[in-house]
Amino acid sequence: MEAVRFENTKFSYRDDGKDPAVNGVSLAIEEGEFVAVLGRNGSGKSTLAKLVNALLVPSSGKVFVCGMDTSDEKLAFEIRKSAGMVFQNPDNQTVASIVEDDVAFGPENIGLPREEIGRRIEFALDAVGMQAFRHSAPARLSGGQKQRIAIAGVLAILPKIMILDESTAMLDPKGRREVMEVIKKLNRERGMTVILITHFMDEALQADRAIVMHRGEAVMDGAPEEIFARSDELEMYNLTLPRAAYVCKKLQDAGMPVKNAFTAEELAEAICASLQRG
Amino acid sequence: MLNDVTFGQYYPAKSFVHSMDPRAKIVFVIAYIVAVFLAGNFFGLAAVTLFLVIIVAASRVPFGRVLRSVKMILFLIIFTAILNLFFYSSDVDHLIWQWGIIAISWEAIINMVFLAMRLFLLVMGTSVLTLTTTPVALTDGIESLLKPLKYIKFPVHELALIMSIALRFIPTLTDETNRIISAQKARGADFETGGLIRRAKAMIPVLVPLLVSAFRRAEDLGDAMDARCYSGAKGRTKYKKLTFTWRDLVGLLLFAALIAGVVLLNMYFGGKFAVFDWIAGNFFVG
């Protein structure tokens, strides 16, 4: 089943509809998919994310979330229940001074009974590995921990789709790793549809599918390996290859017969194989 | 960084007073204030003092910590005391010294001591509330107590949410302020020298970026709340529930006893100047 569907979606922040941030995007995301959306600053990738969550409504065209039209105001509540969103700055999305109160915020909003909210908090904190911090103050946690709490806050609503709008951008490498582990686990074990907006190419490698945005259009769409193999095109959109893939390409350019590799491990193996052959 | 500073003066501990219902504590503080004002003589004030000592002991907050809360208004207490000492003029019988309109009498001295004690007790008693209740619990308590106002369309839930979000953002904005101050210092800003006006002016380059960033944060927070299905008080449930316990019942009985005691002491011993009659009756018999 389709989780999200864009039909020739356009969106402009201006009233006259000029310089659209998203300009005629048509694509479908299947349930259970892990999609990375790439693009440089101002490419329209964050706008795309907000269109899914009905925080923004397309100027023209349609967006469907689990079959619901986001331009129907009456459906906004249901859409947000189905598609949760985690933002960039962990400090700006926490509403309460205690972790469990913050996780409870979403379930409270959808009017669940108390016992159920308690169970949801337990479940969500368990899923992100933060049970030990249930009674802590978010202000004292690390960036990665805060972002995991933010994910838990969204999880507690039990959405089918999780959108992460550059949620790792402000984190240190350790925090980034923590958050990526949680996201991958949710996708693998719970079949959650994940839309990961990012400008870190290494993160995109962990997805099933990568979409490249450029000036409001989805210009590339395919498996991450396939996308990164088209490095000349990527350069046109001001994107760089993941580091290992970049080294690999340089080796190939210099005449070394290594196979395409995208991660450090793959590259090491490719180089070994090539050395053994040669 | 200031990250570890909790807002207000909450003193974390596990005690009888800490685990009372915040709603009950707010009501009790009001009852306590009433008792302090009802007390008409020194016996009444002594009763209130004794009561306060018991409460502080039950709260396991060090006594020095409670006394520290008086420090902030010590100046005010001394100031009013001095004014009272020199300018007290109604029904004076025991004059000591006079110069124009300035006069010192035994009545003025008694009145001064009485007022200072009253202020002292007021501040100490109310600070027990903030020392033993977290700001979050206080907000919950206020929201719950104001609930009846919903019927006159008063936005109780919104007010409580605003208060709790404000509390939640204090550490964040404190960090931000420190960051901005450092950034401005690195560019040669001077916050330490000069008079009051100059120093106040030096804060402008700190306040402007702080305000701008606060607005940006507010917008982000609004989006994040929308994304988590927030749609006002309607159809919303609450996870944390406040419950009255036996502790609150004990508190209720104690405070009722305090007020009754103060009223009885008033009736039995008379006003604060009755002390003259008492001294006259005991030491200058005949």
Image: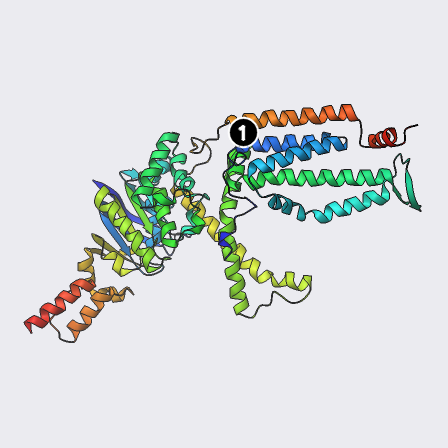
Q: Is residue A132 above or below residue B55?
A: below
* Quarter-of-image position of residue B147: top right
Measuring from the top left, give residue A108's x and y in whole percent.
Answer: 41, 35
Q: Is residue B141 visible?
A: yes
| In the image: residue B132, left or right of residue A120 | right
Identify the subunit bearing mark 1: B
The residue at the point 80 percent across, 41 percent down is B112
Q: Is residue A155 above or below residue B25?
A: below
The residue at the point 24 percent across, 66 percent down is A243
Measuring from the top left, give residue A87's x and y in whole percent.
Answer: 37, 50
| In the image: residue A158, left or right of residue B190 | left
Q: Is residue B73 above or below residue A229?
A: above
Quadrant location of the N terminus of chain A? top left
Name the one closer to the observer, B129 or A225: B129
Name the one closer to the observer, B27 or B44: B44
Read off the residue under disc 1: B147
In terms of secondary structure, where does tag 1 sit? helix
Q: Is residue A266 above or below residue B109?
A: below
The residue at the point 71 percent across, 27 percent down is B262
Disc 1 crowd rating (10 Å Cα; few below 14, some 14-19, many 20+) is: some
Name the one closer to the observer, A238 or A71: A238
Measuring from the top left, give residue B256's x and y in whole percent.
Answer: 63, 25
Identity of the residue furthest to the bottom in this view: A254
Measuring from the top left, give residue A197's x and y in whole percent.
Answer: 31, 53
The residue at the point 35 percent across, 38 percent down is A121
Q: Is residue A72 visible?
A: no
Task: Give amino acid for label 1.
Answer: Lys
